């Protein structure tokens, strides 16, 4: 005879056993640490909420993405070595930044002459919650309308949502997680996977183009009727927040992990 309830209980016990012995290294990117420390704190609280053993190595530094974006990839060599030495002992490395997680996973192995053990285990917090933990509940309550911003690295390198140019069935891990939040209304702008114009060095080298792209993106978010724009990258949110502030546009910005962890 088949006993479905026993199968469910077995899966739950197995999952709790795995979580109990899973060791997580929390990687907080340098710009998050300097400008949005509340995002790092929210990530830690959320991971701990799920019973995970979370460690924050205090000697962590920049992942090297700024050098890579500027065309000086080899200058990031020592940072890559340090990252691997610091994080290779963990089962997973989780970061509240899609762009930094993508840079570590896809570019670190090409910078060093040895296997980067930590790179393959590095994940953005959204994909970790969605793909590894497979959460079906979140502690956050956020009774507001939010518009989802899909950052380029998250879409096209980490697969957090479907890229429109591939003409595949639409999906969004970001929206899946936000849908678990009590009281929230989730919106998406027209052309949902279009770049906001940040792009690291791009916004410095092409400021007029970057500003125009940012303005158009913010206006599309506002057109949804949302009170907040949210996403997995504080860098993109920072860029759009700067555009909105300078132009007096009525919208606020918040990292997705702050919504998922609201109330903790």
Image (cartoon, helix red, strand yellow):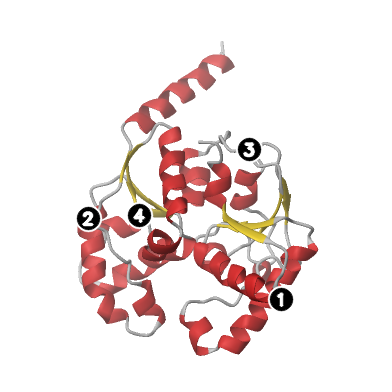
Q: Which residue is mark 2?
A: 86
Residue 28 left/right relative to 206:
left
Instruction: Please give the name of the residue rendered at 46% of the width and 40% of the height, measured from the top-left corner.
Output: 46
Which residue is rendered at x = 34% and y = 29% of the image?
20
Circle 2: element type: helix
Report the residue at 46% width, 65% height from top.
99
Real-space CA distance between mark 1 and mark 3, rounded to the nearest whole angstrom? 30 Å
Q: Position of residue 222 (x, y in %)?
A: 75, 64
- Which one is closest to the eye, mark 3 or mark 2? 3
Disc 1 is placed on an element classified as helix
Residue 155 falls in which quadrant of the image? bottom right
Depth-wise, is mark 2 or mark 1 nearer the camera?
Answer: 1
Q: Earlier in the sequence, mark 4 or mark 2?
A: 4
Q: Nearer the viewer, mark 4 or mark 3?
A: 3
Q: Give the residue pinned by disc 1.
A: 216
The numbered mark at residue 27 is: 4
Looking at marks 3 and 2 on the same chain, the residue that comes earlier in the sequence is marked by: 2
Mark 1 touches mark 3? (CB < 8 Å)? no
């Amino acid at each position: 005879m088949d006993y479905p309830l026993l199968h469910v209980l077995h899966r739950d016990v197995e999952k709790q056993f795995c979580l109990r012995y899973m060791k997580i290294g929390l990687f907080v990117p340098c710009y998050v640490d300097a400008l949005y420390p509340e995002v790092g704190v929210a990530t830690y609280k959320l991971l701990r909420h799920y019973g995970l053993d979370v460690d924050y190595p205090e000697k962590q530094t920049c992942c090297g993405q700024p050098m890579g974006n500027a065309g000086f990839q080899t200058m990031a060599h020592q940072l890559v070595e340090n990252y691997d030495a610091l994080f290779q002992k963990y089962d997973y490395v989780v970061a509240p930044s899609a762009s930094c997680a993508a840079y570590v996973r896809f570019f670190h192995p090409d910078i060093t002459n040895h296997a980067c053990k930590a790179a393959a285990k590095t994940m953005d917090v959204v994909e970790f919650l969605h793909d590894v933990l497979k959460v079906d509940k979140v502690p956050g309550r956020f009774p507001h309308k939010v518009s989802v911003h899909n950052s380029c690295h998250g879409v096209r390198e980490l697969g957090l949502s479907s890229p429109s140019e591939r003409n595949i069935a639409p999906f969004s891990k970001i929206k899946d997680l936000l849908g678990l939040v009590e009281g929230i209304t989730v919106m998406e702008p027209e052309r949902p996977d279009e770049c906001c114009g940040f792009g690291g060095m791009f916004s410095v080298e092409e400021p007029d183009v970057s500003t125009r792209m940012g303005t158009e993106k913010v206006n599309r978010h506002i057109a949804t009727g949302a009170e907040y724009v949210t996403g997995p990258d504080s860098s993109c949110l920072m860029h759009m927040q700067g555009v909105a502030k300078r132009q007096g546009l009525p919208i606020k910005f918040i990292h997705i992990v702050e919504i998922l962890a609201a109330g903790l």
